[in-house]
Image (cartoon, rainbow, N blue to C red):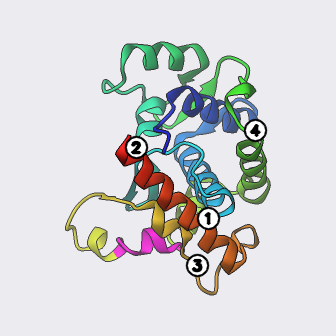
Amino acid sequence: MIGFNYKKAVQTLVFFAEKEGSIINKMKAFKLIWLSDRLHLRKYGRPILNDVYFALPKGPVPSTIKDLADNSDFLADTEKELREKFIENISRFDIKAKDKLQINVFSQSDLEVMHLVYTNFGSLNEFQLSDLSHEYPEWIKFENGLKIGHSSRFEMNYQDFFDNNEGKNHQIFEQEKDVLELNKEFFLENQIIGNLI
């Protein structure tokens, strides 16, 4: 599978910041990105960004996206340069898009899914999105471990994104069972191929 693409990651932050009028709360951005990766995986058999997700008390967090949003010391110089061209921190919790979205880094399906996610969830604030994320099986799997303090975070598995949120599934996550199975198989095959390369 193709690895994490920091250029696309920066543009994903810009995409959602522009949807909010150029300024977005970081936690809100992380949750919208998680929802986008979740939906794209279920519909097309691959995540948009291929970031590593961690389950934290406030829900799933894409770890490298968080580094980009925070302007972390873990970033390489090339990542910092690109990040500083397109986004800036205006507070501890908010980032601002400084330059226009470079749409050419996205596939049509990437854009379709991100628009769909924003249409369905963009009206929610960061706390509502955090609460929403607690309804999904990929986070629920780690809920007890987080509550009793086994760890402050747990690495999540993309395979769990294919599981349905029983009884509370939002309409955009209601894919046919055979579609989900085919896309999961496609995803797993690509993971195996990626590990061989």
Between residues 182 and 136, which one lies in front from this camera angle? 182
Q: Which mark is residue 165?
A: 3
Q: Is residue 79 above or below residue 29?
A: above
State which tag comes first along the sequence, 4 or 1.
Answer: 4
Between residues 20 and 179, which one lies in front from this camera angle? 179
Label 4 amino acid? Answer: Lys
| Circle 3 or circle 1, nearest the eye | 1
In the displayed structure, does residue 193 sit left or right of residue 49? left
Label 3 amino acid? Answer: Asn
Give the alpha-carbon distance from disc 4 to disc 3, as whole Å. 27 Å
Q: Which residue is mark 2?
A: 63
Q: Is residue 64 above or below residue 71?
A: below
Q: Which mark is residue 19?
A: 4
Q: Residue 154 magenta-drawn? A: no
Label 2 amino acid? Answer: Ser
Disc 1 residue crowd, few under 14, some 14–19, many 20+, Cα 10 Å: many
| Circle 4 or circle 1, nearest the eye | 1
State which tag comes first along the sequence, 2 or 1.
Answer: 2
- The picture quadrant where one finds residue 146 is bottom left
Give the alpha-carbon distance from disc 3 to disc 2, as whole Å. 23 Å
Q: Which residue is mark 1?
A: 183
Disc 2 residue crowd, few under 14, some 14–19, many 20+, Cα 10 Å: some
In the displayed structure, does residue 188 sit left or right of residue 100? left
Q: Secondary structure at mark 1?
A: helix
Q: Secondary structure at mark 3?
A: loop
Label 1 amino acid? Answer: Asn
The residues colored magenta run 135-143
Q: Secondary structure at mark 2?
A: helix
Disc 3 residue crowd, few under 14, some 14–19, many 20+, Cα 10 Å: some
